Amino acid sequence: MLLRIPYTTPLPSFPAIPTTATTLQTAITAVSNFLLNTRSTLVLSGAGISVASGLPDYRGPQGTYTLNKEYRPIFYGDFVHKDAMRRRYWARSFLGWKGVERVRPNKAHVAVGRLWEGGWIGGAITQNVDSLHTMSHPDMPITNLHGLLSTVLCLTCRTHSERSPFQKELHRLNPTWSEFLEKMRSTPDMPIKRGPDGDIEVPGVKYESFRYPPCQTCMKNSTFHGMIRIDNDGAMERIEGDGNVPGIVKPTLVFFGENLRDEIKKEAEGKVDAADSVLVIGSSLATYSAWRLVKRAKDQGKKVAIVNLGGVRGEDAFWDDGEGKVAAKYRLGDGTDGVRVEFDAGDVLEGALNILERIDGKRANRKVPIDSLGASRRDIELREIEIATTK
């Protein structure tokens, strides 16, 4: 079966919702109104939230697909069955790993965590594999929809382990590549292309010489004696042609063409079902695994807000009045029923957080969503007046 990467070109922009949310300040106000009038908002974040941390997204103005028309990720089936593809993946990941380790949360991640601490959101689902939400707020409930870069998994025995020791093994098995990595670091103008998952492509570099180790747990299992062939240094020997062998180690992220684990799928669906609204941050929802969660919420009659630079897959369905137009309650509202804005996520969330902490302070002291709020725009105005007159 031929697999196709969905939406490799930028999606068209969508009109602001509400129609007044065309400046940063009005966008902040709309998102504030949305969060003030929900009991339990679920955040769904995508690659766009991590751009300010130095990781490229896929479809944004500076995204991987936008700038590199030839970019093609490795598909799950190719990684599993083709030795050459595994060498390519691990070589590129090896070159980029130090950069991934240095990445830190930006103000959007920090704001999401503070929104959770204040009780305005109940948790998050992220499509990202960079661990930045957890790094920012370790206690916040996070569902890593597409896995993590920080751990690796054996496809045979399912043993999980940390990426850092695996990286050290890659260094040991590839001294020439380690030297190249040092040269790359000391040559700022070297023409490299960094992918959203931290991998680095260096034009003209061949990957055939890169070596990778097998799963050490499987190596100790007598069942696989003679089935896992290694060289004198402990690297897997080259496998000619296609074929399945035991002991293959892959990152725990979800590759293109790979299904989500059932438990992750159910966990994400459970979070959607338990929430009364969804706030999408930095995602075009181009992957079906993310889009279907927002569609699920919408089908359940829940409110949706989207903060994303650029278009979103099938977003007209989230705002439709049944006649192919944006419903009046969205267009003419104040953000309470839904928001669609195109501004930097960090700026919007930080601004909204400042408003929420100022006018909803009691809620800010809670770590779980309160049962009811029901604040109207007039309530907000009255609170702002009260605060201003008591200073």
Image (tube, helix red, strand yellow):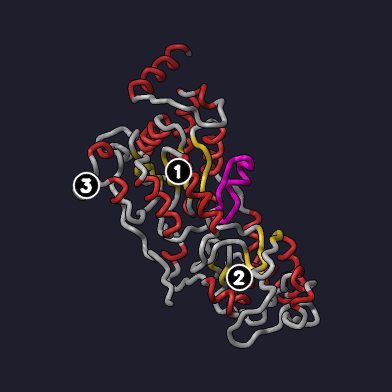
Label 2 or label 3, whichever comes before in sequence order? 2
Q: Foreground mark, 2 or 1?
A: 1
Q: Residues within 10 Å of mark 1 (few under 14, many from 20)?
A: some
Q: Residues within 10 Å of mark 3 (few under 14, many from 20)?
A: few
Magenta span: 128-144
Q: Position of residue 212 (x, y in %)?
A: 70, 74
Residue matched to label 3:
322
**151 relative to 68, above or below:** above
| Residue occupied by mark 1 | 273
Query: What's under tag 1, amino acid-wise?
Result: Asp
Alpha carbons under labels 2 and 1: distance apart = 39 Å
| Residue 217 position by quadrant | bottom right
**Which quarter of the image is occupied by the N terminus?**
bottom left
Residue 61 seen anywhere in this rendered image of the structure: no
Q: Which residue is mark 2?
A: 92
Q: In the image, residue 35 lies at what x, y percent? A: 42, 33
Q: Amino acid at mark 2?
A: Arg
- Secondary structure of residue under mark 3: loop
The reply to whether the magenta stretch includes residue 141 is: yes
Separation (CA) of disc 1 from disc 3? 24 Å
Residue in view at x 51 percent, y 23 percent: 361
Q: Position of residue 270 (x, y in %)?
A: 49, 46
Q: Residue furthest bottom?
A: 240
Give the secondary structure at mark 1: helix
**Mark 1 or mark 3, which has the lower sequence index?**
1
Name the outermost residue toward the left.
323
Note whether residue 185 is visible: yes
Find the residue positioned furthest to the top. 390
Which one is closest to the eye, mark 2 or mark 3? 3
Q: Residue at x 42, y 76 (%)?
A: 2
